[in-house]
């Protein structure tokens, strides 16, 4: 019964995440029609203050929706974490699938994109978040699988350390280029301001990403797979 319930949850959460991905991609279609009628490309266009703030809150709302689904699906914290990263991953992958269907973009998996705006702008080749998403689906599946056969299953401290440190490394690879560029003129407080100054936003439009640290990104993925390996090994032993 538990296994069948998990199958239903995987399907229903995936359907929700895919629908969310279409809504997200639809918003991007509208924004690009306004600001990038000839196609999205760096450097960025200056977006009006109110729209920029709305975009920030839209991203917050997206995270709240994904977390809410995870909370509804399960009562256990570790399983809620698994459902959250599973929903996030499905949403992220299908976001790019829908953009390709609607706009013919990205032209390749190495096309640069703006990935996130909180607390600063994240950029990277499309391939990078897709790899992260596939890893999250694997991790979520492993956690849910072993929880279904052992309700006392937990992720150990060492495994959490690998996962958290790997996540921090990934975030660094996505934010390194933009942050370095902005800190040449502004303070970290200017970058983290909820309502950034007009000169900060104007300078940000000059940022063009040219280098992605694939080596550091690879280190983060290795940490994730080490955590997954340890989880499987420990669960099988018990």
Image (cartoon, grey):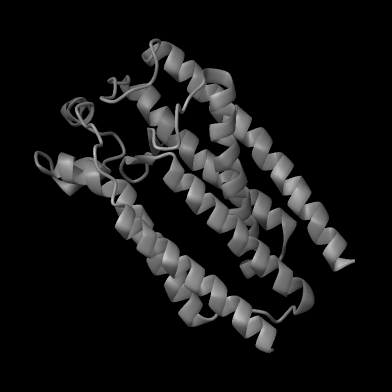
| Residue for point 54% across, 81% down | 156
Can residue 171 be seen from the camera position used here? Answer: yes
| Residue for point 49% across, 50% down | 131
Nearer to me, 39 or 20: 39
Image: 149 above or below 211: below
Q: Position of residue 88 (x, y in %)?
A: 57, 48
Image: 181 above or below 152: above
Nearer to me, 150 or 141: 141
The N terminus - image quarter = bottom right
> In the drawing, does residue 26 fall left or right of residue 198?
right
> In the drawing, does residue 49 fall left or right of residue 135?
left
Which quarter of the figure has residue 16?
top right
> In the drawing, does residue 177 fall left or right of residue 17?
left
| Residue for point 75% across, 79% down | 150
Which quarter of the figure has residue 73?
bottom right
Q: How many marks?
A: 0
List the single residue furthest toward the bottom: 238
Nearer to me, 185 or 61: 185
Nearer to me, 91 or 227: 227
| Residue for point 68% across, 34% down | 19
Q: Position of residue 84 (x, y in %)?
A: 60, 55
């Amino acid at each position: 019964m538990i296994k069948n319930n998990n199958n239903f949850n995987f399907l229903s959460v995936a359907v929700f995440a895919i629908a969310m991905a279409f809504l997200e991609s639809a918003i991007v279609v509208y924004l690009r029609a306004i600001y990038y009628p000839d196609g999205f490309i760096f450097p960025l266009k200056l977006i009006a203050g109110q729209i920029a703030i709305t975009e920030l809150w839209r991203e917050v709302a997206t995270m709240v929706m994904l977390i809410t689904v995870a909370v509804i699906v399960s009562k256990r914290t570790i399983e809620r974490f698994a459902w959250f990263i599973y929903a996030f991953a499905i949403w992220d992958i299908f976001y790019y699938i829908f953009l390709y269907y609607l706009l013919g973009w990205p032209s390749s998996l190495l096309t640069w994109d703006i990935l996130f705006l909180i607390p600063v702008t994240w950029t990277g080749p499309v391939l990078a978040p897709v790899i992260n998403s596939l890893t999250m689906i694997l991790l979520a599946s492993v956690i849910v699988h072993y929880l279904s056969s052992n309700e006392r299953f937990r992720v150990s401290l060492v495994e959490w350390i690998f996962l958290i440190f790997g996540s921090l490394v990934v975030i660094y690879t996505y934010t390194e280029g933009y942050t370095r560029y902005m800190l040449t003129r502004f303070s970290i407080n200017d970058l983290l301001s909820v309502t950034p100054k007009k000169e900060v936003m104007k300078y940000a439009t000059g940022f063009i990403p040219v280098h992605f640290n694939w080596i550091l990104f690879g280190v983060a993925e290795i940490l994730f797979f080490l955590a997954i390996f340890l989880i499987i090994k420990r669960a099988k032993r018990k």
